[in-house]
Amino acid sequence: MTYAVFILFTLMALCGGVLVVTQRNLVRAATALVLSLFGVAGLYVLLEAGFLAAVQVLVYIGAIAILIIFAIMLTRRMVQGDESGLNRQWGWALVSAVVMFALFCYVVVKAWPLALGAVSAPAVPADSTEALGLALLDWEQYVLPFEIASVLLLSAMVGAVVIAREKHDS
């Protein structure tokens, strides 16, 4: 049963990712991103990482994906679909996609014998969530990068609103 659920969540994550990069409509692509992120949250649940699954749902699905949808809706010109889905860099994109696919295939083929002889993972410590919270709030380690990332996200959203408003006013 666990394998069936694993396959289901893996397919959700992979199909959502493929839809994100193949959809021409940005709103549908953002919805596919939510599907992909939900599949990843399910994989975290299977790994017994409940805290990471909750953070995935709350932060990524609940905040980042909704922020992306709002940014798309603020730029109505892109949602109308008047622009072509292809650009001048499609050749480079194809080459890099083929190279990355070949690299992933190489890694999977090299790691396959190791995966067949895998040993069971040690149990997750009971206080891992507490240790993670303390590490994130430790002033000397991660508070400053965490705050810089939040200010960067806020400035990106304000910039998107300003750019959308300038185009709307003119």
Image (cartoon, helix red, strand yellow):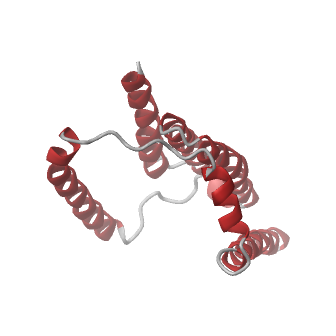
Task: Tell me if residue 48 comes above or below residue 83 in the rendering.
Answer: above
Residue 4 picture quarter: top left
Q: How many marks?
A: 0
Residue 116 picture quarter: top left
Q: Where, quadrant-wise, is the N terminus in this rendering? A: top left
Q: Residue furthest top?
A: 1
> Where does the image place residue 122, in percent across and percent down from the top left?
41, 44
Q: Between residue 110 and residue 75, name the one nearer to us.
A: 110
In the image: residue 121, left or right of residue 124 = left
Q: Residue at x 66, y 49 (%)?
A: 55
Task: Tell me if residue 97 comes above or below residue 169 in the rendering.
Answer: above
> Where does the image place residue 103, in percent across and percent down from the top left?
22, 61
> Where does the image place residue 92, in percent across and percent down from the top left?
30, 70
Q: Residue at x 14, y 45 (%)?
A: 113
Q: Residue at x 25, y 66 (%)?
A: 95
Task: Tell me if residue 139 comes above or below residue 61 in the rendering.
Answer: below
| Residue 80 at least partly seen | no
Q: Where, quadrant-wise, is the C terminus in this rendering? A: bottom right
Q: Between residue 90 and residue 120, name the one nearer to us.
A: 120
Residue 157 picture quarter: bottom right
| Residue 138 at least partly seen | yes
Q: Between residue 138 and residue 29, name the one nearer to us.
A: 138
